[in-house]
Structure formats: C-alpha cells, structure tokens
Image (cartoon, rainbow, N blue to C red):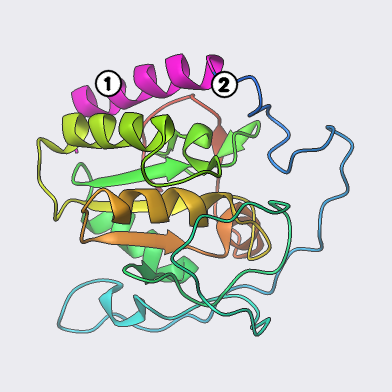
Amino acid sequence: MTRYLQAVLLAAATVWATSSPSLAQDSFGGTKSHPRPAPPAPDAIAPPTASGPGTEVLSQPGGRNFGVPGTSRLHSGPMHGPTPDGIPGGKTVTTRALADLLRSRQGSLLLVDVLGGPESLPGAIPGAWLAQPGSFDDSVQQQAARMLQQVTGGRKDALMVFYCQSDQCWMSYNAGLRAIAAGYTNVVWYRGGIEAWKAAGLSTQGAGSGYGVP
C-alpha cells in the first residue's frame, strides 16, 4: 500500500466519519467516561518459519476464549463485550505476528484502526465508520466497497488488517466482515487490539500522526 493510497483512505475516512455523527470517538456507544476493561494478557509469541514472518500464527485467536461462536452477521448489540475466537471468511493474528507482518510487508499492508481513539498502532489509517451495524446492502457497505476498490486498485487479495480496542471489542469484527462481504480474500482481524499491543510493550502513535511502522 503506497503512501498515496494511504492518504486517499485517510481523506475518505475523515469525510465519511464526519458525516456519521453516531460514530463518536467513544467507540462503545457511551460517553468518554465509559470504563475500560482490564488489558488482556499478551498474545503468545512464536518464532517465524520458512513460510514467512508471522504467517505461522495467522488464524491463531490471541486473547481469551469466551466461548462465543463466530458469526457472519454484523454485530448490532453493544460494541463492548466478549468476541468470538475467529471471523468467518477471514484470519486472526497474534501481536508478535502482526508486528512481524508490519515490518516485512511495509507499504503493502493496509492497517485500519476501527477504534477512533487518541492513539493508534503505527501506520494505521482511521476507519471507525466501518464498524456500523446494518446489512451488507446498506449505504455503509456501498461506501466501504467503493473505498476499498480505490485503495487496493481492485485487488481482491490485498492484505488488510482491522483492529479496535481488545478481545472485547466488536468494532473491528464488523469492519472485517464488511471487507469480506465486499469480496476481499485476505482479511485479517487483530482480535487483541491496541490493548494487547501495548501490553506486549510495543509503541503507539498519536492518531493520524504518521504512517511509520514499528
């Protein structure tokens, strides 16, 4: 993903987010004082294999097992709550694997912050508007399809990673489902989110402050 395409996505996300007042920076539908859950334990760390950095831990859940079944329907309940271990049609990734992917695929991985908080993972692009519930034929889905088509150049195998707060945040789950419904075949859900990233001692950046990688 080039910086030009990242800039296009950043501009598009800003326009659509400001046109959707229901998606305030408090990503769980409450007020800024909404209590935060305790950080999850850091994800398991596995060494890279010959197949490439981090690929051996794709589709490993990371975080806690709440016994919640995966669903291909957009989540319409509270956005804060236990999540499934996996996402139908997509992959999950652990913290170390994501850090490896960001280093090894610099410029070719789209990392989308669906939380909309004051800080983000390095290199992430804002996309909280993608978390909206609804259906796969609503206006949000149509906007998502157009935006992803533009930033990927029509490549349905483009690697994209969605994350939000923690393994108790459904926002990035919804965003991942929207990308999958749009026909993308390489969608990754970082279930641990920014809390697992920070618990592993990795750095963050101010939201919108740059496009660097860790």
Which residue: 83% across, 32% down?
32
On the image, the x and y values in percent for residue 117 come to 65, 34
* CA–CA distance in space, label 2 to label 1: 19 Å
Which residue: 18% across, 74% down?
52
Tell me the quadrant of the picture where the N terminus can be found.
top left
On the image, the x and y values in percent for residue 92 come to 41, 70
Which of the 4 quarters of the picture holds residue 47? bottom left
Amino acid on which the number 2 mark rests in the picture: Ser
Can you tell which mark lies on residue 8? 1
Amino acid on which the number 1 mark rests in the picture: Val
Q: Is residue 176 magenta?
A: no
Nearest the viewer among 27 and 38 is: 27
Look at the picture and state if 50 lies above or below 186. below
Q: What residue would you read off at disc 2?
A: 20
Which residue: 75% across, 38% down?
29
Look at the picture and state if 104 lies above or below 93. above
Boundaries of the magenta span = 1-19
Q: Secondary structure at mark 2?
A: loop
